[in-house]
Image (spheres, grey):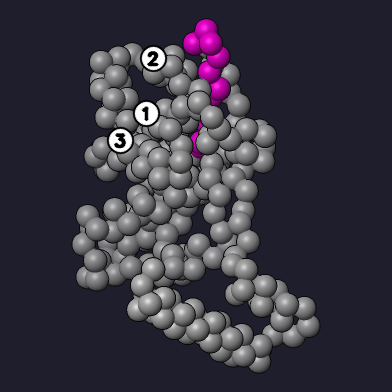
Amino acid sequence: MTIFSYQQSVVKQFFQTMTKLALICVLCTTLTGCNYFILIGYLIGGPPSIEPDFDAQTQKSLTGKDVTVAIVCYAPLELQYNFDGIHNDLAKYTTFRLHSHGVKVVNPDRIRAWLDENPDWDKPEEIGEAFDVTYVIHVELHKYSLYEENSSDLYRGRAEGMVTVYEMDEDGEGEKLYSKEITSFYPLRAPRATSEITFSKFKKEYLSRLSDEIGRLFYEYYNGDDFTQAI
């Protein structure tokens, strides 16, 4: 490290420390009792992490050694009619989320090609056997919308569904290991006006949000992660 970069680092750390202290002073005027210590611990040590629900419920992890995962999403025809390719889009976004958190995931294009070649498939375990994976994550959408209720000029992403995990054995047989209902709502505080953002951009934003909510079932996240999603 050069002297110049070292000095920059020291200055940066100084301003970060002063910023934290200033924030403590401001917030302490509205806090009492043990809240002081909670706030100080949060600012100094960072936000506490939350264990993935899948890990807590099964005592297993998708990031384990030699663990591989296939993701498949299903949406009823009426949802596909209104949102073309929503099941494929969500599978791709969720795959990216898990991959970015250290999970070995089958390329969604390979799974999509297999589904096209096998239109009569009816069990997620068939996909697990075809790709010789450890787990199959099956995301079934029941409801999906990008608009605020009873409005055509306000965006609000909404989704309901079920996430189910099947564990595969050496014989290509699968057993349901985990299931969780999901209810998604974005933005959290207020809808977005259609005049402020294009449909395609909001769609991408919501797919990113929804895939993260699904992903959090399987990877660690932090209490403060939703702050930027509130608006």
- The type of residue carrying mark 2 is Ala
Label whose residue precedes the other's in the sequence (3 or 1): 3
Which residue corresponds to the image point at 56% horizontal and 59% vertical from the top-left? 222
Local secondary structure at mark 2: helix
Q: Alpha-carbon distance for marks 3 and 1?
A: 14 Å
- The amino acid marked with disc number 1 is Val
Where's residue 95, x and y in %? 38, 38
- Taking depth in this image into account, of 142 and 114 the one nearest to the observer is 114
Indicate which disc residue 59 carries. none
Residue indicated by mark 3: 88
Marking on residue 106? 1
* Secondary element at image label 3: helix
Tell me the amino acid under the disc marked 3.
Asn
Q: At 27% across and 29% down in the image, what residue appears?
A: 109
- Horizontal side of 36 relative to 166 (left or right) equals right
Asked whether the residues under the numbered discs 2 and 1 touch, taking CB atoms below 8 Å apart as contact, a structural biologist would say no
Span highlighted in magenta in the image: 162-172
